[in-house]
Image: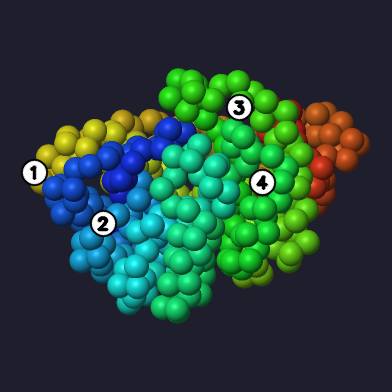
Amino acid sequence: MSVRHLYVHVPFCAHRCGYCDFVTVTGHDEVHAAYVDALLAELELHGPPAPETVYVGGGTPSLLADDLLARLLGKLSGAAELTVECNPETVTPEKARMLRRSGVTRISLGAQSFRPHLLETLERRARPGTVARAVEILRAEGHPNLNLDLMFGVPGQSRDDLQADIEAVLAHAPEHISWYELEAKPGTRFAVHHGAELARQAEALEDHYETVVAALRGAGYRWYETANFCRPGHESRHNLGYWLGHDYLGVGVGAVSTLGLVRRRNRPRLRSYLDALAAGAPAPADVEQLTASERGLERLMLGLRLDRPLHLNGLAALVDDAACDRLAAAGLVRREGGTMALTDRGRFLANDVVASVLR
């Protein structure tokens, strides 16, 4: 397998949070072993894995029993960056030790907030003390590269709540912080239950965002992508692959691959995935043929999320020059020497700015 980036999806969760729209399943403990077998079989169908980065996400990969997760990771070790997502309540000294011995170089912990009432709203099982204990365990086992995921715009969140979350995450001193705006998809039970408060929160999102960026930058973190911050040298190399438009392979139920101009989406039904791989067949999938223009537009939209200039080699024809000039005059865009980037002000308005500069 020649692709540089591999994503491995583990869909199992102890509980499905109301805002989540990822491919997840609850329960089904009895098929965890069969699912690991299926993942390894799918990898074999693609050839021996030798990517630069591997990201094991979910779902909750750390919900797998230690021996099953170790078996999976044994086929993935050797990558320069190997990330595993963990829920804080699943982290034990034994699991942390196994992850370290299995070659994991980066752990991503789903904290989401350190305010108990917001965690209740988000239906998260971990509490602030659970996160602190997980960080302590991982550090004691020698894990040098931790990411904490957080959210703003949570129903009921106040400025004081946000400030408390900022202080708490900085106290844990992770190497990387991902801080996302809560997005509740229409039709999810979360959107139904919290619709009015989500609308109220929408009015505060810009202020929340600017507060987070200023605080983390002031603490020495680099705002290197729209929702991601890192200490020097601790960017997520895997996610950078997506943002820079590299090819990537995804395995597992619901996983997506983009290889050249072909996008493949494994279908989200667990049983059909298990049955196909057990029979030696490829995972059931939907295949989409992209055009060069579509792929180029994706590279522009993703590349402009970064704090580095985007080289426009082969992409310049997709940029609306007149719109770009207007936005540059307004202090939102910089374009020079065959590159393009958003200014800090432009990054806060990234969705609108990027939509405006594309033909």
Mark earlier in primary sequence (1, 4): 4
| Residue 113 percent coordinates (x, y) | 56, 49
Quadrant for residue 210, please give it. Answer: top right
Residue 198 is marked as 3
| Residue 291 percent coordinates (x, y) | 49, 31
Res. 107 visible in picture: yes
| Residue 284 percent coordinates (x, y) | 22, 35
Residue drawn 44% across the image and 45% down it: 124
Q: Residue furthest right?
A: 329
Q: Nearer the viewer, residue 140 or 306?
A: 140
Q: Which residue is mark 4?
A: 161
Mark earlier in primary sequence (3, 4): 4
In this picture, residue 258 sits left or right of residue 340? left
Residue type, label 1: Ala
Give yes or no for contact between labels 1 and 2 (Cβ–Cβ under 8 Å): no
Please name which of the two marks, 1 or 2, marks the residue nearer to the observer.
2
SS type, badge 4: helix
In this picture, residue 203 sits left or right of residue 15? right
**Real-space Cα separation, disc 1 to disc 2, in angstroms:** 23 Å
Give yes or no for contact between labels 3 and 4 (Cβ–Cβ under 8 Å): no
Please name which of the two marks, 4 or 2, marks the residue nearer to the observer.
4
Q: Which residue is mark 2?
A: 64
Residue drawn 50% across the image and 37% down it: 121
Res. 283 visible in picture: no
Give yes or no for contact between labels 2 and 3 (Cβ–Cβ under 8 Å): no
In this picture, residue 84 sits left or right of residue 114? left
Q: Which residue is mark 1?
A: 279
